[in-house]
Amino acid sequence: MSEASTASAPRPLNLVAELTYRCPLRCPYCSNPTNLRDFPEALTSADWARVFREAAALGCVHVGLTGGEPSARRDLPEIVAAAAGAGLYTHLVTAAMPLTAAGLAVLKERGLRSVQISVQDAEAHASDEIAGTESFARKCALARETKRIALPLTLNVVLHRRNLGRVREIIVLARELGADRLELANAQYHGWALANRASLLPARAQIEDAARVVAEQTRRGAKPEILFVLPDYFRDRPKPCMGGWARTHLVVAPDGRALPCHNAAQLPLEFWNVRERSLASCWADAPGMNAFRGESWMREPCRSCPERARDFGGCRCQAFALTGVAANTDPACALSPEHARIAASHSEPARAELRYRERT
Amino acid sequence: MSAAAPSARVDPGALERRLRALLEERYHDKHPFNSRMHAGALTPDELRRWVRNRYYYQTRIPIKDGVILAKSEDREFRRSWIRRITDHDGDAQREGGLELWLKLADAVGLDRREVASLRNVLPGVRRACDAYVELVTSSDLLASVAASLTESRAGALLGLRAAAFEKHYGWIAPEGLAYFRSRTTQAPRDAAEGMAFVLAHARNAADAERCVAALTKKCEILWALLDAVEWGGAKPRLAPAAQLRENEPLVVLPERAVRLTGSGREMLAACSGTRSIEEIASLVRARHPDAENVERDCYEFLEQMQRLGVIEAPV
């Protein structure tokens, strides 16, 4: 933190380390860029070790090792050791392939603190169909192994039209697997998911039914803790995306670019690369990082809105993808002049086929 | 199962099944503390803590029934419902439930004046019981009667409890069990009256939803009461998933961090797994002799930390 300018930048608490965009799964709502081949995997484990040390110096306390599939990298044990060694709480987000039980034990020994495993549905056939590969049984086995070796487990399930009706079964599965937390993540329509929106976007009644099941199944203090947030497409207000632009989360993409969120590389903004500059400088001084910090960039209706401090104007990537201008109010907000674009999506004819993520 | 239109007529049979299923699932007879009580696994201290704290709930019953009385325009309803107040307060002819509960306090070796003073009621218990009075106050007559339907499980539970006490807690004099026995007949009678009222007055789907919501809330309140009683004996420790940062008031957990304010860090650092919350509070009080409400703050803060997964308290 030698640069004077870093003093004015907020403190990032969480580093999202996208180690690779390779993944054995092909989920049609993948949050990786649709042009993922344009991101070469450019950081060695030594580079990551430096990023972790610099992140800790910036004030980060937690790192999510993610991708793609982080265990697609053979040097994952060294990367985990470097993250833990830098004093970061080291959390692995995995599809449980190609990671094995033995591999997981090694990661724990190197300092891994917690694990998130994704499944795509409550049962094998439907889950494997979305994943585009046979994977459900392995995921369940690794989830059990995670608990067996006493690591905290989050189960993550992306929700959409095809599995919302099985939220109850998903909760039962999470209990059976011993998950500490269950993240019921309604699909966010960016990238691959936007391309598949007509096949994935649920009906409002499905969301309402799922919310009711979640409320019924929620017991204070009981495990798993269930996280379910009404998706922005079904609310009149946008999500407080990333807790504000370049405010608490810092993403480093596989090519070394430092970003405020995993989608931001899609925006016509200049971000800097940790291969060329210090992480502190990438965070504090890159023009892209500063493009939407604070409130001075806001246009109406955000600029004068009393809710701007809570939702930060919503999601810049969604504003860009749907209106062509990243500084516009997120169209998920009913106050946005372009809200009709969201409303129209609800009456799009449903499509049956899925466009899978390409093989990597 | 999409919700029916709010104006749709209610099938009383279906509503009754729904309410009973809700009780089957969420009534506090399944709470671990009750299970341990009935299995004979509670220590004398735990039983005393429960008796002392549950008395606060007992004192709220006639108050909430007074609130319910005041909501009704119907003389017949009031004439019948007022009996519940007498059941708890007693009259010239017989002792009421509150007096019987104090006899239980005597029998478990508590000082009945201390219990009646309510001064040692745990903050979480107080909050749960006050929430019940608030629920009844803010609901209409129908929903507040629906909230009382937990009585339809109370008769059976208290029968079981009387037997369990005789079997497992022989050190408690039998006179102490009079409250449980009195309720095994009163509760089913009251429950039948309440259920009949609800089924006769819930006219449409919106009414039914309000009844279900009120009874759900009541089940949560009873559950929270026992959580708080359990919490009163907890010796919390940092959860394995939680990492208390050195030199800064921050706890890190998988995918989230919790910022601590005030003496939060001190309280967490004192969660050794060997100290009760009372002991943790005395440590904090010793360091901050001028602070007010340290004990209450400590219970509430640590309860919140437990909810967030920061600490755990194995029973």
Image (spheres, coloured by chain):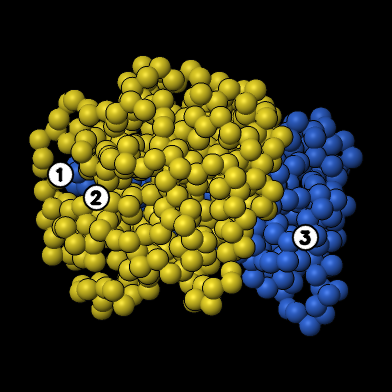
Chain colours: A yellow, B blue
Same chain assignment for discs 1 and 3: no
- Position of B44 relative to A53 (above/below): above
- The image shows residue B147 at horizontal and vertical percentages of 46, 50
Q: Determine the secondary structure under disc 2.
A: helix
* Chain for numbered disc 3: B
Whether residue B236 is visible here, answered yes or no, is: yes
- The image shows residue B221 at horizontal and vertical percentages of 55, 51
Per the rendering, the mark at residue B269 is 3
**Residue nearest the observer in this picture, B28 or A359:** A359
Question: Badge 1: how crowded within 10 Å, few (<14), some, or many (20+)?
Answer: some
Q: Is the residue under label 2 in contact with that under label 1 (CB below 8 Å)?
A: yes
Amino acid carrying label 3: it is Ala
The residue singled out by tag 1 in the image is A346
Same chain assignment for discs 2 and 3: no
The residue singled out by tag 2 in the image is A233
| Quarter of the figure that contains the N terminus of chain B | top left
- Position of B106 relative to A73 (above/below): below
Q: Which of marks 1 and 2 is nearer the N terminus?
A: 2
Question: Badge 2: how crowded within 10 Å, few (<14), some, or many (20+)?
Answer: many
Q: Determine the secondary structure under disc 3.
A: helix
**Residue nearest the observer in this picture, A182 or A355:** A355
Residue at the front extreme, as displayed:
A276
Residue shown at 38%/49% (left/top)? A262
* Chain for numbered disc 2: A
Residue shown at 84%/36% (left/top)? B169
The Cα atoms of the two marked residues, 1 and 3, are separated by 51 Å
Amino acid carrying label 1: it is His
Q: Is residue B232 left or right of residue A152?
A: right
- Position of A61 relative to A19 (above/below): below
Whether residue B116 is visible here, answered yes or no, is: no
